[in-house]
Every structure is written in structure tokens, then in C-alpha cells.
Image (tube, grey):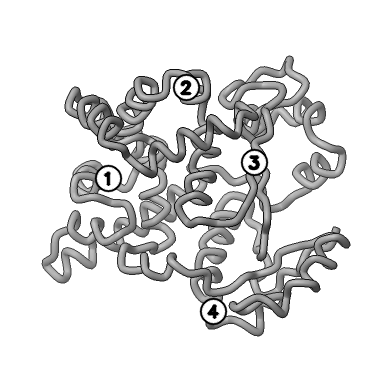
Amino acid sequence: MKAASICFGAETDNADCLAKISRTIISESPEYKAILNKTLAEGLSYPAARQTALLEYLPECKDIITGGSNNILAIEYIKAILYNNLNMTYYPVLREGAGYNDDTDTAEYASAFGIRKMLMSDEHDRLKTYLTAGMYEEISNSKSCPLFLDDFSNIFNHKMLFIKQICNINNTDFADRLAEYEDISPDIANRFAGTFTGSDTITEFAMKVKSKNIVYSRICRCIMHIILEIRKSMSDSYNNIPYIRLLGFNKTGQQYLGSIKKELDVPFITKAADYTKELIFDLACSDIYAQAVYEKYGYVMKNELQQNIIRI
């Protein structure tokens, strides 16, 4: 999209220190790698080992290294920019109000975690304090949201049962089949196969699979890869962007898009119905989402091809 800059939230606005951490992870100097290997040998999980190694290697960045999930995400953004030699400027924006995992209702700005918790507990009156009037009305009147991870539990259990049945019919190993999915190692596949009963919610299942070396967030990603049929064999398709699909824009965005449209070297999709072949995977994922909406709310969503571009 010819973007020259990116702006993202973080627990710090110290871009220099975030970049220093990112370069350290990318370059893996012998000294840093030795510290990392030592902490891994002590039995720490990889995320904990990396944090410990960074604290020892870059003590001047201590507050940022231990600053929370948004700093981790900020570092990943900068890593991608540096690793791919992108000519982009990055601007971290300092969080204000509640902390990342804070569900307090006394801060001026609530965290996304806090807002999700309010939604899950139907505390809509509290939401009015933190959402714009338009957003609050949209959510309150919606027939298709909110959805949460456990709302996909039936779909996950049915998918796992289907895979297991196919393995039984073909006399193949259930764990080996699961290991074909993206990010699922043989160890994770074995734990999935040994833990699965078909009666747990996704949260319950993930907590049973979770271990010192397999963190909860990774397990949830693996579960979504199974649901969405994302396999390791598809990894080559991630190396290049096959198309750009426009979801919405304002007047400024419309002018910008008009100025760069002819310079793009991939299809620029404004009408999904004209690109069903290119969007076949997206359409399948949308159908899964629509199924979860129907199971929870009894509402039949529009087909993805019928969705209109949002104009602000």
C-alpha cells in the first residue's frame, strides 16, 4: 500500500530502545545467544528465557522488556520492518489509562481486556463510560456480536472429531495428522490427541494442554489453525501478498487510494464478487465465523460477497 509509516500502541514511546531490542533478537549475537541458550537449559519456557536473556544483555531497557504484551507486539512490528528492510518510520504511542490486563473501571480509558470482560458479563451500563455513543449503539443493537473464543468450541470439537474419524477410517495416526497444521509441533500434536474428548470448551481444552514449554496463547493459535484449515504446506503462500482487499475508507483514504492504485502490482479488490477465486480461503473462514454467529444468536449473516465497503 506504499505505506511510509506505521503507528501502534505500546507501554512506552521510547522507539530507540524498542529498536535496540528488536535488532538484538534479529542479529542474535554470540553473547546474547549464549545467554539465551543458558536460560533455556535451565528449563524456562522460550518466552521467559528470551525475556531473561534480554534483561541480562540490555539492562538499560529493563522497563521496556518487562513492560507487558503491547511492548512485545511493538517489538514484533519493528522486527518485521528491520528484517525486511522496509523503508518505514514507526511511531509507538504510549498507553494511557488502564493497563493491558487491567479491568478497573476507575481509569479514564479502559483496556481492551476490561472492555471484553464487560461484554462477557453483559455490563453494558459500564461500557457507556468508555465507548463512543455510536460504538455503544452499534454493539448494543448488533445481531452478530460479540463473539468470544469459546463460541467456536462446537466448531472446533466437530472438526477434531471429523479428523479423528478420517484417521480411524484410513488407519492413520491422529497426532501425525494434527502435526500437519501450522505451528503444531509433534509434541503439541500428541498433547492435543491425548487430551481431546470432544466435550471441553476451547478454554478448558487449552488449559489442559498448556505446559511450562507450551504457552496458552500458542495453543489457542494452533486451535484456530485447525478450525480455519491453515496447514504448514500453505506457508509458501504467506511470503507474498496475493491481493489487497478494500474494506472501508474515508475521504482522505479515498484520495490516497486513487493516487497509488495504478502503482500496485497485485489485484486491488473493491468488489469481492469479481474475485471469488482469489478469495476462496477468506470466504471459507467467513463461513465459519457466520456459523458461530448463528449458533450463538440465531442470526444468519450476509454472505461475504454481499458485504458492502464501509464509507466513513
Q: Earlier in the sequence, mark 1 or mark 4?
A: 1
Q: Which residue is mark 4?
A: 278
Mark 4 secondary-structure assignment: loop
| Furthest residue in direction left, as rendered | 171
Q: Decide: is 239 above or below 296.
A: below
Is 172 situated left or right of 107 in this image?
Answer: left
- Report the residue marked by disc 1: 197
Whole-percent x, y for residue 63 in the image: 51, 19
Residue 219 can be seen in this image: no
Pick whichever of labels 4 and 2 is earlier in the sequence: 2
- The image shows residue 128 at horizontal and vertical percentages of 81, 30
* Mark closer to the observer (1, 4): 4
Identify which amino acid the numbered label 4 is placed on. Answer: Glu
Mark 2 burial class by Cα count in 10 Å: few <14, some 14-19, many 20+:
some
Residue indicated by mark 3: 8
Q: Nearer the viewer, mark 4 or mark 3?
A: 3
Q: Residue at x 22, y 61 (%)?
A: 177
Report the amino acid beneath label 3.
Answer: Phe
The CA distance from mark 1 to mark 2 is: 37 Å
Tally of marks: 4
Q: Amino acid at mark 2?
A: Thr
Contact (Cβ within 8 Å) of mark 4 with mark 3: no
On the rendered structure, is 262 left or right of 113?
right
Cα–Cα gap, marks 3 and 2: 18 Å
Report how far apart the C-alphas of labels 4 and 2 lie in the structure. 42 Å
